[in-house]
Amino acid sequence: MALLSADLDYLRHARKGQFDWGWLRSTGSEWGVHPRPGKVGLTLRDIAVGSYGDVPDDPPRRTMAPRGAEIDPDVPDMGYTINSKAEVWSDNLLDLYEEAVSRQWSATRDIPWTELPELDPDLEHAMCQLCTVLSEVEMVASDFPAKWLWRINHDFVEAKMVLCTQVMDEARHTEVFRKRALANGGGLGKAKAVVERFLKLILDAESYDEGSALMHLLGEGIVLSLFRAGELIAPSPVEKRIFRLCMQDEARHVAYGTMHLRYRLERDPSMAADFHNYLDKGEEIIGMLFTTPEVVEPTTLLAAGSVRAAEEMGLGGADMLRGRVIEEYLQRCDNAGLPRRGRLKLPAELTEGLAVGAEGEVA
């Protein structure tokens, strides 16, 4: 392709005040469209007016030109590979973005680190091991969107913006759990291969659909349930605040993933079989996580308060947490229009007492 050259004739004329003014006299914009700010300011939903609110299902171009702008016919092709709206869209995108930018917090300033109490060594070790796992798994939720962002057509800019907030959210989660592991003298614990296998499954996904199902619906959904439990069993108000702040972020990511899957299936129900296959693979590894000591025992110890109390309690607390995690995951699948009850790929010992064989068609 030949290199473009500067228009020196224009430069010479402009120096004499002979401007072009074509952009001023002729424009394809909707002149006169006037969005009105709401109570919280001017939101993305406020500016989704006129043609600017129309997001094409299949954009005619693959450029970074703003949607709604008058575009030169010879703009370069950016090589986007995700050019179907249904591949990334959800009906809650605009609101999720506004919530994300309004609820950003700092792992440096907004956690009362100076109030962190000295804990019993076993409890400190348990908290550090839990933080090790969380700082490990949270970063994949930054890496995955970053892998796909540059492939998404710019006409779906709101979806890209939401994923950008997720990248920042998850970087902060990794930061806060790493800081907590180090802040009280405990340090990082063990990183297990089974955890890495699940993360690799997400990063190796061959499509955005596959990776999003594994990460947003399954992986982040489980972490969201774990954050809820973490707030309950936190040994001090410092950890409670950490889990509470992370929980509000994670809830957005899960809400996007659930509604994205629903949007996708409503427009192409035949894809249900593919999504079932994606989750089949993910659930098999999740089953191994539920039987990994470094994952199971820290929460058990924190909930019990001591090693002796944990041994007397056995897996009662862990079973309750696992049951809640699985049930909340199945409910998300139901809400997305992909019922998993009846085909869950977990050993029977892990689902005892749950309604996993209830209604739900198997695609």
Image (cartoon, rainbow, N blue to C red):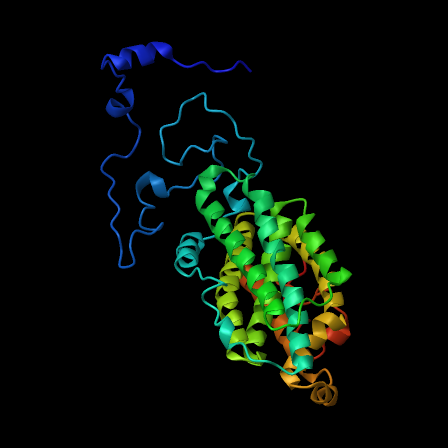
Say whether residue 12 is left or right of residue 302.
left
Looking at this view, is 335 or 117 the one in front? 117
Residue depicted at 50% across the width and 60% down the height? 255
Residue depicted at 64% across the width and 74% down the height? 127
Position of the C terminus, as image quadrant, is bottom right
Q: In this view, does 286 lie above or below 140?
A: below
Q: In which quarter of the image is residue 118?
A: bottom right
- Residue 271 at least partly seen: no
Q: Is residue 20 above or below residue 183?
A: above
Image spot of residue 21 (x, y percent): 26, 20
Image spot of residue 144 (x, y percent): 61, 49
Position of the N terminus, as image quadrant, is top right
Looking at this view, is 340 or 293 the one in front? 293
Image spot of residue 251 (x, y percent): 51, 64
Looking at this view, is 300 or 340 the one in front? 300
Residue depicted at 73% across the width and 85% down the height? 314
Residue depicted at 52% across the width and 75% down the height? 238
- Residue 347 at least partly seen: yes
Q: In this view, does 321 lie above or below 48?
A: below
